[in-house]
Image (cartoon, rainbow, N blue to C red):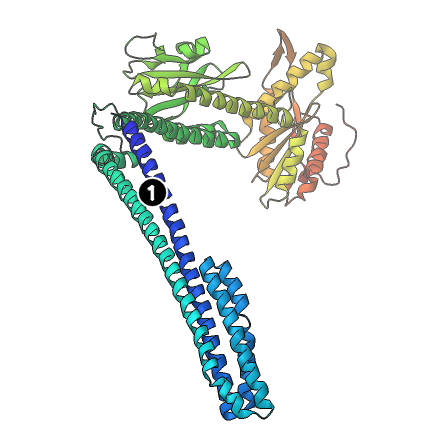
């Protein structure tokens, strides 16, 4: 039988017995109340009779003392007691409310009559005493008539006392017997209820519930401590204990699954945290080398058992070169063409492994570990490659979604950096010559004005530049500017910067160089440019020459006038015949004049 059925039957029996016990207790309490009322009535009647008895005795004593002593206070006490004695009629009425019988009321009525008769004798005696007939008054009070009346009154009081005592005693005995009976019944019902309850405790709770639960306490405690390795025994019972055991087994299975899911969730959260940190660092990178360092730092933390490399395009955009690697990948070629990677060909991730599940990328050579290539794309262009290796193929497949997310953000970071570099180059460089522009020159002048080191400035102007535009067209003029710019850039020392000042004029700033060394560089540039003939689209444009003006600071003058003094020297060089370099310090009393363009 199921525990629930047994428990319900025991519950019904217990409820019935409890109700009977409760009813018995209610009846017992009611009987006790009746008993208490009987006791109270018995006591009240006794007090009433005692009052009558005491009142009758004391009144007679007071009047006799008065006649014996003649004290007025004794007479006053008599009148007080007489007043109380006149309350016999009220006492009789109160006895009715206390449940006195007709016989008792008749005796009380007789007491009232006898008290009045005694009162008349005593009042007559008091009148005689006050009229001077003291002896007659004493004979009346101490005489046989008074004694007989007083004796009759006391006899009636004793009679009513015996009657009331007997009646209230019988009522009290009956109430007590009834109260005791119901009390015994109530206690018996309570004892029977306790026996039923103890039987349920022993047969149901102990044998069918407590013992199996105690046996499984250790299992439950271990499960509560998340120890899901404990084994749950198989129970063949078809009652609630069997169902509970089956539920515990299900709980253990769910706990194992929940623990596995929690571990995966923690691992996923850890991966997401590292990816988020890496994305934040990537957004703050200023160069591609910094991006490579960030990837090499966070990838081993994000995927500890995975090796890999980051590739980006070289300057010519012809090959992919490694920027960084981590955890020692088996294959890290110095450079390889984009055509050797299936991921770059297809524009989507490509998985290669030794089981020939798919074609392997040629750049992987003889690797034995599964490898995943993820292209880095942004704005429709491929900017690099993320290469991953793992000991097991499942590791790559499980992390593939995260790796593609990283590759997407990494491609955007590299593309944004390259775009920023292009925009920065467009802002600071001349689009025709590729040299730094006039804005960059102004910033450089402001920068070197704060440095104490010596500086030199060369102002260059292409001689007779207008001739090239007039004879060959503006395209030829642009070719002349590019030609001169290439020579200036290739001949420039490491400590120098070259700018296109405007039109056919160029400016070179040298750090840590004096005027003499700058003059020698100017003469070298004049010679190199004049020695390099120029042709454009099959047309020979002739020889190109330049004039150079040289100035230095701060020995020869402040930095603020460096460009102006170099420009003055340039005008002097053009005036002197062009195709030469002139230092401003060599000009004594030179006054700038007109010079042909």
Return the x and y of residue 264 as percentages of the image width and height.
36, 26
* Image quadrant in which the N terminus is located: top left
At x 52%, y 92%, the residue is 135
253 up-or-down from 318: above or below: below
- The total of numbered circles placed on residues is 1
Q: Nearer the viewer, residue 475 or 114?
A: 114
* Residue 226 appears in the picture as rendered: no
Q: Give the answer, above or below, for where 284 lies relative to 386.
A: below
Secondary structure of the residue carrying numbered label 1: helix
Q: Position of residue 125 (x, y in %)?
A: 55, 85
Residue 486 in picture, x, y percent from top left: 58, 21
In this picture, residue 333 sits left or right of residue 215? right
The residue lying at 48 percent from left, 23 percent from top is: 410
Quarter holding residue 249: top left
Residue 261 versus residue 105 in the image, above or below: above
Judge left or right: residue 357 versus residue 52.
left
Please state which of residues 407 and 88 is positioned toward the viewer in this rendering: 88
The answer to whether 314 appears left or right of 360 in the picture is right
Tell me residue 19's x, y (percent). 36, 39
Q: Which residue is mark 1?
A: 21
The residue sitting at 54% across, 70% down in the picture is 87
Which quadrant holds the C terminus?
Answer: top right
Examine the image and state in which quarter residue 258 appears: top left
Front residue of this view, candidates 393 and 386: 393
Query: For the point 56% across and 86% down, which residue is it?
Result: 126
> Left or right: where does residue 96 sit relative to residue 440?
left
Residue 444 appears in the picture as rendered:
yes
Count neighbours of disc 1 (C-alpha within 10 A) and say few if under 14, some if 14 to 19, many if 20 or more. many
The residue sitting at the right extreme is 594
């Amino acid at each position: 039988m199921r525990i629930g059925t047994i428990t319900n039957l025991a519950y019904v029996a217990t409820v019935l017995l409890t109700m009977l016990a409760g009813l018995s207790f209610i009846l017992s309490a009611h009987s006790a109340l009746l008993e208490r009322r009987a006791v109270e009535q018995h006591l009240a009647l006794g007090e009433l009779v005692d009052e009558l008895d005491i009142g009758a005795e004391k009144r007679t004593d007071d009047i006799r003392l008065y006649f014996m002593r003649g004290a007025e206070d004794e007479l006053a006490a008599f009148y007080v007691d007489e007043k109380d004695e006149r309350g016999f009629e009220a006492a009789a009425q109160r006895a009715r409310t206390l449940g006195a019988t007709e016989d008792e009321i008749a005796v009380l009525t007789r007491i009232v009559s006898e008290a009045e008769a005694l009162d008349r004798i005593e009042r007559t005696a008091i009148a005689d005493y006050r009229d001077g007939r003291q002896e007659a008054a004493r004979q009346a009070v101490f005489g046989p008539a008074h004694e007989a009346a007083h004796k009759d009154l006391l006899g009636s009081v004793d009679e009513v006392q015996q009657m009331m005592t007997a009646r209230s005693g019988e009522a009290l005995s009956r109430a007590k017997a009834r109260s005791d009976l119901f009390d015994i019944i109530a206690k018996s019902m309570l004892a029977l209820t306790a026996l039923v309850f103890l039987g349920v405790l022993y047969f149901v709770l102990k044998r069918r519930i407590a013992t199996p639960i105690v046996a499984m306490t250790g299992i439950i405690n271990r499960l509560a401590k998340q120890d899901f390795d404990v084994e749950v025994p198989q129970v063949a019972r078809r009652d609630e204990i069997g169902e509970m055991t089956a539920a515990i087994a299900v709980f253990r299975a769910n706990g194992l699954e929940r623990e596995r899911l929690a571990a995966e969730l923690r691992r996923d959260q850890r991966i997401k945290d590292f990816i988020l940190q890496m994305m934040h660092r990537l957004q703050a990178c200023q160069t591609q080398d910094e991006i490579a360092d960030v990837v090499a730092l966070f990838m081993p933390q994000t995927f500890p058992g995975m090796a890999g490399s980051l590739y980006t395009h070289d300057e010519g955009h012809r090959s992919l070169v490694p920027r960084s690697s981590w955890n020692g990948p088996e294959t890290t070629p110095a450079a390889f063409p984009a055509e050797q990677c299936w991921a770059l060909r297809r524009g989507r991730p490509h998985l290669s492994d030794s089981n020939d599940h798919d074609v392997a990328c040629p750049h992987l050579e003889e690797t034995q570990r599964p490898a995943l290539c993820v292209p880095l794309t942004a704005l429709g262009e491929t900017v690099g490659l993320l290469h991953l290796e793992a000991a097991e193929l499942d590791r790559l497949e499980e992390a593939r979604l995260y790796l593609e997310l990283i590759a997407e953000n990494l491609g955007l970071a590299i593309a944004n950096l390259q775009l920023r570099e292009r925009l920065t180059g467009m802002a600071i460089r001349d689009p025709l010559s590729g040299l730094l522009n006039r804005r960059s020159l102004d910033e450089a002048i402001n920068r070197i004005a704060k440095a104490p080191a010596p500086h030199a400035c060369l102002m260059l102007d292409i001689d007779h530049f207008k001739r090239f535009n007039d004879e060959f067209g503006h395209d030829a003029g642009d070719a002349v500017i590019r030609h001169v710019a290439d020579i200036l850039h290739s001949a420039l020392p490491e400590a120098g910067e070259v700018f296109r000042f405007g039109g056919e004029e160029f400016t070179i700033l040298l750090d840590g160089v004096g005027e003499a060394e700058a003059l020698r560089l100017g003469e070298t540039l004049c010679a190199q440019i004049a020695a390099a003939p120029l042709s454009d689209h099959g047309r020979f444009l002739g020889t190109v020459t330049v004039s150079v003006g040289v100035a230095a600071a701060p020995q020869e003058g402040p930095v603020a006038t460096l460009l102006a003094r170099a420009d003055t020297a340039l005008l002097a060089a053009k005036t002197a015949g062009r195709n030469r370099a002139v230092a401003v310090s060599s000009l004594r009393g030179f006054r700038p004049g007109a010079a042909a363009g």
